[in-house]
Image: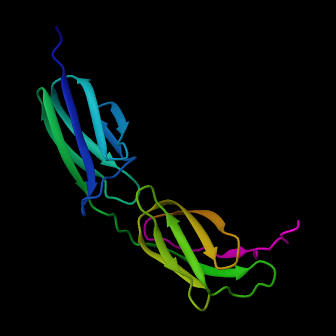
Amino acid sequence: MKNVAVLRGHVYSRDGKAIGAAYVRCGDKLTLTNFDGEFRFDDLEPGAYTISVSIKGFKRKEIPINLRDHLTLTIYLDIERGSSKIYGYIYDAETGMIIDSGTVMLILPFTNYYTQIGKDGYYEFNELSSGTYEIIASPLNYLDEKASITLLDGEVKRLDFFCKRKTEEAPWG
């Protein structure tokens, strides 16, 4: 009978929040954590492995282990801070005038970043690592606009949004 081992565990942020949808690699096997941050590998051969955990917005973590039969790990990830920046202005698509109220969201798998649109229509996100980001501009009384942008390490990019005003339909059609 073949000797098998089981590896299971949880992935959390430094502040103790479970991280779902993180990639966990053990040898040539790959899985995703569930919404509780839990992962599991069954039917592994006993031996030495390097466990690798990664998700956008957090530093990749590698942990060497020696797996004999069953092992449970608790892994904490640190937020990744980079030197890249996204900034821009929010404009009315029809008039070209600055829009000075609302929110801009930077979408990440685990948690989103939010910033308020300034009185001059300006927004920015700092300390980003390299990668591709989805950004949604949500100005007050305007339709949301979404864009994707890719950053290299240390890169600064401008991304302006031109939003259309929401129109009210008469209740009678």
The reply to whether the magenta stretch includes residue 158 is: yes
Q: Residue furthest bottom?
A: 119
Task: Say if 98 sits above or below 31 in the image.
Answer: below
The reply to whether the magenta stretch includes residue 120 is: no
8 or 141, which is in the foreground? 141
Task: Say if 49 sits above or below 168 in the image.
Answer: above
* Residue shown at the point (59%, 67%) measured from the top left: 136
Residue 101 placed where, x, y %?
61, 85
- Residue 164 lies in quadrant: bottom right
**In what quadrant of the picture does the N terminus appear?**
top left
Question: In screen coordinates, is 136 left or right of 11?
Answer: right
* Residue shown at the point (18%, 25%) measured from the top left: 5
Question: In screen coordinates, is 54 left or right of 158?
Answer: left
11 or 128, which is in the foreground? 11
Task: Say if 86 sits above or below 9 in the image.
Answer: below
Residue 166 placed where, x, y %?
75, 74
140 or 117, which is in the foreground? 140
- Residue 163 lies in quadrant: bottom right
152 or 21, which is in the foreground? 21
* Residue shown at the point (31%, 38%) measured from the top left: 25
Residue 98 placed where, x, y %?
69, 87
- Look at the magenta stretch and give its main secondary structure: loop
**In what quadrant of the picture does the C terminus appear?**
bottom right
Q: Residue furthest right?
A: 173
Which residues make up the magenta segment? Answer: 153-173
Residue 66 placed where, x, y %?
12, 34
Question: In screen coordinates, is 87 left or right of 83?
Answer: right
